[in-house]
Amino acid sequence: MIFKMTVVSALIAVVSSVALADLPTLEKKDRYKVGFAQTESNNPWRIAETKSFKETAKTCNWDLVYTDAAGSAAKQVSDVDSMIAQGVDVIFLPPREERPLLPAVLRAKAQGIPVFLVDRSVDEKVAKPGRDYVTFLGSNFIEQGQIAAKWLIEKTGGKGMILELEGTTGSSPANDRRKGFDDEIAKHPEMKILASQSGDFARDKGRKVTETLLQTYPNANVIYAHNDEMAIGAIQALEAAGKQPGKDVLIVSVDGTRDALQAIIDGKMGVTVESSPFFGPLACSTMKRYANGEKIEHWVRVKDRVFTIDNAAKYIDEAY
Ligand code: AHR
């Protein structure tokens, strides 16, 4: 606790020393050197996001400086520092976790490089959009968790023994998808979250965590996964344990990947709340608005759909 407070106080001190300066502006020009510092490439969502940035680089006249932090916040910090050293015009950053990337965001600002957070955010108690970075482009993760919970409550009549597979510890989608979901579930006395554990947004970790949790909680009849990759891992673990996903255990999740839509069609998954990875075009238009001197809203919100058996077949061909 004391250590946590010290880290937060230290971050606040660093932020306060840079916060007074205005946000860097962006010159209007035909071609930009754009940094995109990806977190990792171990799932279809990340691969689709990177593809979207690479395709946009061609249509939006960017010289793209692309890095992959391979699942390490420390590497992502050094990737951002290297982009600063290379003199990029702007940086698009999905901070792997909410806090470790804060100093790098501030160093970019101090060097006159506007930062746009994309798909994940930083701790807003410490760094603020419109002051420390331009804006956050992304979904409402709390709402995604709420939608998943409400679907489940309606489907089960408010009864269920739930295992929760959390995303990367300390990341904004894991924090917010948990909050949105858990707060809704807490309103229903006959629903219980038996255990909640991180599977790091990865399929195999989701499988292993589910395997272990099923041994301790064989009475679980719902799995809420913070993303589709972990949900697919959970389906594999359930089948290996001789249980029928979708019948013995209901699965609710977030993202909208092709595998998840197929699992819905196959009756193995109940719902996935969309979280779109296609940020390239939005990044291009927001950056142009900023270069034109427009005041950018603090949160450029992405609207998400909900996929169930009613529409999964209709959308599977556009899924990734
Ligand atoms: O930040 C968005 C999340 O990160 C997606 O839900 C997940 O699949 C990805 O790794």
Image (cartoon, rainbow, N blue to C red):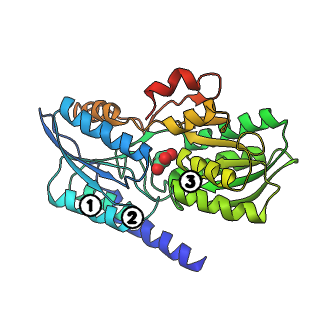
Name the amino acid type tagged 1: Asp
Mark 1 lies on a secondary structure that is: helix
Residue 180 visible here? yes
Q: What residue type is disc 2 on?
A: Ala
Residue 257 appears in the figure: no
Q: Residue 73's mark?
A: 2
The answer for how far apart the CA atoms under marks 1 and 2 are is 10 Å
In the picture of the structure, the residue carrying the numbered disc 3 is 174
In primary-sequence order, the first of circles 1 and 2 is 2
Residue 68, horizontal then vertical, whole percent: 30, 56
**Neighbours of disc 2 within 10 Å: few (<14), some (14-19), many (20+):** some
Q: Is residue 22 above or below residue 84?
A: above
Q: Is 101 left or right of 311, judged from the image as shown? A: left
> How far apart, in angstroms, are the residues tagged by discs 3 and 2?
15 Å
SS at mark 3 in the image: helix
Closer to us: 24 or 235: 235
Q: Residue at x 42, y 38 (%)?
A: 277
Q: What is the x, y in percent for residue 50?
A: 32, 43
Report the residue at 63% width, 52% height from top.
Answer: 234
Residue at 59 percent of width and 57 percent of height: 207
- Mark 1–mark 3 CB contact (< 8 Å): no
Q: Is residue 202 left or right of residue 283?
A: right
Q: Quadrant of the N terminus?
A: bottom right
Badge 3: residue crowd in 10 Å (few <14, some 14–19, many ≥20): many
Circle 1: is it few (<14), some (14-19), or many (20+) Cα within 10 Å?
A: many
Q: Which mark is residue 79?
A: 1
